[in-house]
């Protein structure tokens, strides 16, 4: 069992949150019983608060979710969490959360920000980690950097995917028009590798585990990823909580956020064990490769508070440059509206 203290090398916002976390207070909020000043809380089963959490069971970046179940992080925070594997559109997911069919969800910031601009009553409470999006090309393509994509065709799993949005943003920052200088072609994620082999596209972009597996099996060259340059310390995976839950039962929203952050830290410290836990949802995956994927992600970077709000604003700025968000959107005002600091 892992314990956390202020010696962990993490950002000031996270450190402040840890100082404010009081196990005994959490026990009182849910009627639990503290087992000691430094130990976890114990709750009788009938004292656990039921909660529905949506996630994508096929995405390795969501590994902290089953970790939180298996390692008891949710239970220690007084929660009985039902996992809902959601494979529909982001709009449908956010609508499900906003209307109470689910209480919260874990997803990609670059997929969620546009629908959130449209007014769904869902608040982002914490970043989970960075990494997991990659752009690949064959080793004979001559494409060794993003500039080499000019005039080329890139395969993506959908035209609003986080990977498509991310690499469009980075191309724009290089002075390459992602709409006119690069061609995008959509394929089912499972066919991206075949499209590349057939020469229908010159590069492919998607998220782990699909893109990592293709890189290894087809010996592809990783042209870029979302941990380069200014994005080295930027989250891509976030936690969103139903607005009414935050307003009416803030203690539960806080408990969920705390539990998932602790599970994320545990994942960072125990990637092999986390991969083994996640593998139950991906029985055909190689646990060794899942471990390597988790090691490449930045699960120790999970900002909260104003640090997280600022990252949301930066993504809003980015998405405006490629026409995903309205140019007139005030990024700071937007980030303040869609963020809730439940940990204070």
Image (cartoon, rainbow, N blue to C red):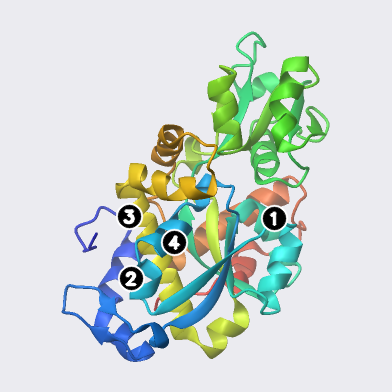
Residue receiving disc 3: 266
Q: Nearer the viewer, mark 3 or mark 2?
A: 3
What is the number of the mark on residue 87?
1
- Tell me which label, 3 or 2, sits earlier in the chain: 2
Percent across and percent down for residue 302 are 42, 56
Q: Nearer the viewer, residue 302 or 175?
A: 302
User: What SS does tag 1 mark?
Assistant: loop
Q: Badge 3 local density, few (<14 within 10 Å), some, or many (20+)? A: many
Cα distance between the residues tagged 4 and 3: 21 Å
- Tell me which label, 2 or 1, sits earlier in the chain: 2
Residue sitting at 53 percent across and 77 percent down? Answer: 51
Cα distance between the residues tagged 3 and 1: 26 Å
Query: Which quadrant is home to the C terminus?
Result: bottom left
- Residue 176 visible within the image: no
Percent across and percent down for residue 138 are 64, 15
Cα distance between the residues tagged 4 and 1: 30 Å
Q: Quadrant of residue 2?
A: bottom left
Q: Badge 1 local density, few (<14 within 10 Å), some, or many (20+)? A: few
Q: Are marks 2 and 4 in contact (CB under 8 Å)?
A: no
Residue sitting at 36 percent across and 89 percent down? Answer: 29
Residue sitting at 69 percent across and 43 percent down? Answer: 165
Cα distance between the residues tagged 3 and 2: 17 Å
């Amino acid at each position: 069992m892992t314990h956390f203290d202020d010696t962990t090398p993490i950002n000031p916002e996270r450190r402040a949150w840890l100082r404010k976390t009081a196990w005994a207070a959490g026990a009182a909020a849910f009627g639990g019983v503290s087992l000691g000043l430094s130990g976890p809380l114990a709750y009788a089963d009938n004292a656990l608060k039921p909660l529905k959490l949506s996630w994508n069971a096929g995405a390795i970046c969501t590994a902290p979710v089953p970790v939180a179940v298996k390692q008891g992080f949710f239970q220690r925070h007084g929660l009985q969490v039902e996992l809902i594997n959601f494979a529909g559109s982001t709009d449908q997911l956010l609508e499900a959360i906003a209307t109470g069919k689910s209480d919260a969800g874990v997803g990609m910031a670059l997929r969620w920000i546009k629908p959130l601009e449209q007014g769904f009553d869902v608040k982002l409470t914490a970043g989970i980690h960075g990494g997991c999006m990659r752009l690949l090309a064959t080793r004979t393509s001559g494409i060794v950097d993003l500039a080499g994509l000019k005039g080329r065709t890139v395969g993506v799993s959908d035209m609003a995917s986080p990977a498509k949005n991310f690499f469009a943003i980075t191309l724009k920052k290089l002075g390459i028009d992602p709409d006119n200088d690069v061609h995008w072609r959509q394929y089912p994620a499972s066919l991206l590798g075949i499209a590349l082999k057939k020469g229908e596209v010159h590069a492919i972009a998607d998220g782990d585990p699909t893109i990592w597996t293709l890189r290894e099996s087809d010996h592809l060259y990783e042209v870029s990823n979302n941990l380069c340059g200014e994005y080295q310390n930027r989250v891509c995976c976030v936690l969103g909580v139903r607005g009414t839950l935050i307003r009416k039962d803030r203690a539960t929203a806080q408990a969920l956020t705390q539990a998932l952050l602790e599970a994320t830290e545990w994942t960072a410290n125990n990637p092999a064990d986390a991969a083994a836990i996640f593998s139950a949802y991906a029985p055909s995956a190689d646990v060794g490769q899942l471990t390597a994927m988790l090691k490449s992600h930045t699960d120790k970077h999970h900002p909260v508070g104003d640090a997280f709000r600022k990252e949301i604003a930066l993504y809003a700025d980015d998405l405006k440059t490629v026409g995903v968000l309205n140019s007139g959107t005030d990024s700071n005002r937007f980030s303040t509206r869609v963020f809730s600091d439940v940990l204070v």
